[in-house]
Image (cartoon, helix red, strand yellow):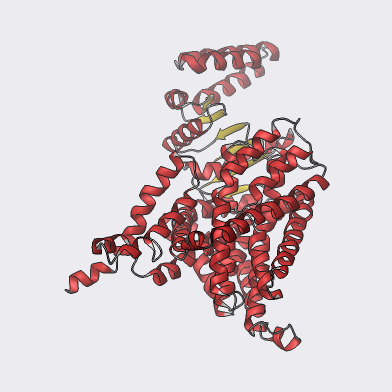
Amino acid sequence: MDGHGATDGYKDIVLFLATAGVVVPLFRRWKISPILGFILAGVALGPFGLARLGDLAPWVSYFTVDNPEDIAQLAELGVVFLLFMIGLELSWERLRLMRKLVFGLGAAQVAVTLGVLTGLAMLLGMDVAPAAAIGAALALSSTAIVMPVLIEQRRHHSTTGRATFAILLFQDLAVAPILITLAVLGARGGEELSPRLLLTFAPAMLGMIGLVAFGRLLLRPLLRSVARAKSEELFMAACLLVVIGAGLVSALTGLSMALGAFVAGLLLAETEFRHEVEVTIEPFKGLLLGLFFLSVGIGLNLSLLAARPLEVLGLAAGLLLAKGAVIFALARLTRLPPLAAAEVALPLAAGGEFAFVIINQAAGLGVVSLQTGQFVMVAATLTMALVPVLAWLGQRLARREPPPALDEAPGGGEGAPAVLIVGYGRVGQLVGDMLSRHGAAWVSAERDPRLVEQARRSGRPCFFGDASRAEFLNRCGLGDVSALVVTMDDPEGAETVVSVARRLRPDLVIVARARDARHAKRLYEMGATDAVPETVEASLQLSETVLVEIGVPMGLVIASIHERRDEYRQDLNRPDAVGGRRRSRANDKG
């Protein structure tokens, strides 16, 4: 009996893991967001799904969730990790370059949409507080669904893609203030704001100030100390400590855990550990966010759709029309052509994942009734399911117009570096210096935290992390750079980086440092565009120096050095697919 009771506690976890193993591959194969799969799976596994068949078929209980409250409590960490990642992805430089779109178009979208939806809710007979809570929830769109769809369509770097990203970015920034406002509204059961009421939030403000001060002073030294231990497990533990610890501090002061995690992400966004933390946290975020949407589905009463179809479908259609019209009008004010404005408005007209967070918090605080919250969440879910279709329709419309132009930097508002340098020791530093002298933008990645610290103190763009991982290379901008320079003194590590980078970017120019001719041959086999053997180059440099010193004309010496270098390259037996291009490049240099 004890053994059976012990295993009962794991049934819900096993059901979730089995769902993740089935839903994610299946929905990605169908090119549908796995988020919708988790929501539908939650509906099936919850009390409004298969559990209703328990009286007719007792065996169904083996495929239903027994403790949805426990699942919901753990699922809250999904939102915590999501907001932490959003904070990490923000940076003051990104906000500065995109300030016109983010704080112009994005802020106007949230403000106007919130006002319109709140007004419509009040016209339906709701009080100001619940109407504002619902308006705020539905004013936000789904970053988790819209951005992957745009990336899949390769529209995220287009002008309309940048406008869409700017709106989503401001919406993410608006989540924290909305949650704080909800806490104020619910603190005294909807009592009007007063100085006395605001004083009750003094501990929360002090806690937030303390969290920011602690982060400024101790976060970077903490991660630097852990990084020097060269243990992936310790670094992972430190990252989890930062996320959960910041969330708990925020919760203890009366605010949400998600807000504390968001602040921690913002504090880490400007550090050299940003990309490594992103790669480390991403699996936890993905798994816990799936659990969050599963718990949303468990609490989602789709029977409302059968009981009140006209009202639910009417709310969903009204949301798409009202929100889409607002975004379309604002996009036109930014001088986007009509069809391009429609491309921005269509996918953003749907609801988003933060609608569930805001509605649940509002219901928990008594600002919105539970029945009304359920009604709104069902309608929002229906609109989220339409995002891929709406994005496809917007793309088809945009093809009929010439591409518009906005006054923003390419690549989502950030100046993308031209070169990525992996390894920032003496060789990497010299490469970076030469690139800077010729005005080429670059960024570097290094595994030694001491070298990273030295580079950051000198104002050099260097990030700590393991470049042998595809996720880290992508975070460092491998998809946007024109060339990759591998200067690592670890032969096997260099080969791994070259192989991974070539798999990710078949068109990328990859120049790698090689220990000797044999190592250079292996790098060519891995996909390097050029490999520079240290022993060969040292010999050629020595030969050049001595020939000039004994009186041989400089021009003849340089020509002979280039000729000998070409002979070495030909002797390395590079693959035909790339050999012709190498020889052509070498002859051009000569």
Residue toward you, 373 or 512: 373
Q: Position of residue 511 (x, y in %)?
A: 56, 29
The residue located at (47%, 30%) in the rendering is 515
Q: Going by the image, does 285 lie left or right of 219?
A: left
Along the viewing direction, whichever of 328 and 458 lies nearer the viewer: 328
Quarter containing the C terminus: top right
Estimate the x, y position of residue 438 in percent, counting from the top left: 73, 32
Task: Please give left or right for residue 396 compared with residue 312 in the image.
Answer: right
| 192 relative to 131, above or below | below
**Viewer-nearest residue: 170 or 373:** 373
Image check: 347 left or right of 236? right
The answer to whether residue 103 shows anywhere in this view is yes
Q: Quadrant of the N terminus?
A: bottom left
Residue at image coords 52%, 12%: 567
Q: Is residue 186 above or below residue 468?
A: below
Question: Is residue 477 or residue 375 the one in the foreground?
Answer: 375
Farthest residue in the bottom direction? 196
Q: Is residue 223 above or below residue 209?
A: above
Residue found at x 69% / y 35%: 397
Quarter of the image holding residue 335? Answer: top right
Judge whether 143 appears above or below 527 on screen. below
The residue at 55%/29% (across/down) is: 510
Q: Residue 370: image x %, image y %?
A: 54, 73
The answer to which image quadrant residue 127 occupies is: bottom right
Q: Is residue 467 visible?
A: no
Spot occupied by residue 23 in the image (x, y as percentages of width and height): 40, 48
- Count up the numbered dots: 0
